[in-house]
Image: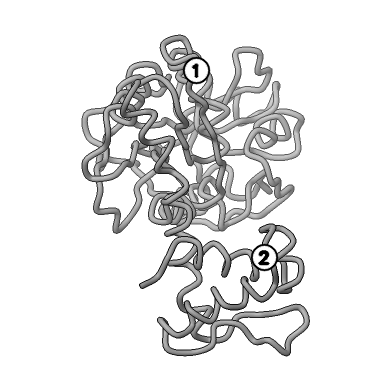
Amino acid sequence: MVTLRQLQYMLAIVEEGSFTRAAQRLHISQPALSRQLQALERFCGGLLVERDARPLRLTALGQAIHPHVRAAVTEAGRIRPAAARAVSGLRGELQLATMDSISLGLLPPVLRAWHESHPAMEVRLAEHRRTKDLMAALGEGRADIAIGPALDGWHGSRRLIGVAEFVVVLPPGDTAAEHAAGEALPLADLADRAWVRLAPDNTLGAVLDEACATAGFTPRTAVQAEQSAATPWLAASGLGPALVPAYLLPPSFTGRTRLPDPPVRQPLFAYTAATPGPVVAGFVEVLVRHARVARAPDPDGPGAVSGR
């Protein structure tokens, strides 16, 4: 039978790259560590670690089970916090996974409201670039709730938070902004511009590519940024237009904004296990109530994009 200790010891060996350092970290003797790994190898039917490599590395069998070992250890580490949450409903830890644009633009009032009613509960926020990373965080037990656009293949619970409206950001005095004052700006009118954007593998970068493709062109790049918060300010400085969710813009923003034509909208959801516990369900309610994103009746309506 496999024990949690054996799984923890395997991870320590992999992370430290040697039996000696792993034994020191675990405060056990090296022979005792070796015996535990050998017991796990007998259960699995083969060697898990190449002993002759420096640093040590996993065999093909070890690589196959490593994600499951890590997930099992992670889940085991969440037993005590989960018990505390179940007992008190107030203490413990809540792990969130989302995109950096959402954590900047939507979560501050949500987390403030949550903290007011759960001051002793620690919230851990992990920010990701791609929706598939949100799926991985949920599936591997690294998140209680994922907040983001559509996740294909998620079989747990999903709750619509709202539908984000995207805007084109331009600098003050830009002729396109002035021409479109009070009306939507055709994206095709900006086909000859070089854009401020995020990488194509970033969710918001993919939204730009999809929207421009719908308008009949491929956007050229003036500046490619890493953080979503930088893109509207770079665009406002005159480096090129940007397409960003309206919720990302602070009240102090000085650039010009226009709704694009065709419209660009992105449904946002909260994802949890199929049957979330009371704490997780409670947070989702706070999220839906306090997230400042427009509601829309049809998340699959005109202009909806996935941004995967």
Residue on which disc 2 sits: 15
Where residue 261 sits, quadrant-wise, is top left
How crowded pointer 2 is (Cα within 10 Å; few <14, some 14-19, many 20+) is rated as some
2 or 1: tag closer to the N-terminus: 2
How crowded pointer 1 is (Cα within 10 Å; few <14, some 14-19, many 20+) is rated as few
* Residue 19 against residue 277 in the figure, above or below: below
* SS for callout 2: helix
Q: Amino acid at mark 1?
A: Ala
The spot of residue 256 in percent (x, y) is 62, 22
Distance from disc 2 to disc 1, alpha carbons, whole Å, reads: 32 Å
* Residue 107 against residue 267 in the figure, above or below: above
Residue positioned 70% across, 27% down in the render: 171
In the picture as drawn, the residue positioned furthest to the top comes out as 116
* SS for callout 1: loop
Q: Is residue 166 left or right of residue 126?
A: left
- In the picture, which quadrant includes the N terminus? bottom left
Residue 164 seen in the current view: yes
Q: Is residue 135 left or right of residue 27?
A: left
The spot of residue 141 in percent (x, y) is 42, 50
* Residue 123 against residue 47 in the figure, above or below: above
Q: Amino acid at mark 2?
A: Glu
Along the viewing direction, whichever of 208 and 214 lies nearer the viewer: 208
The spot of residue 189 in percent (x, y) is 55, 42
Residue positioned 41% across, 11% down in the render: 117
Along the viewing direction, whichever of 18 and 153 lies nearer the viewer: 18
Where residue 148 sits, quadrant-wise, is top left
Q: Is residue 116 left or right of residue 289?
A: right
Along the viewing direction, whichever of 76 and 286 lies nearer the viewer: 76
- In the picture, which quadrant includes the C terminus? bottom left
In the image, which disc is placed on residue 120?
A: 1
Q: Are marks 2 and 1 in contact (CB under 8 Å)?
A: no
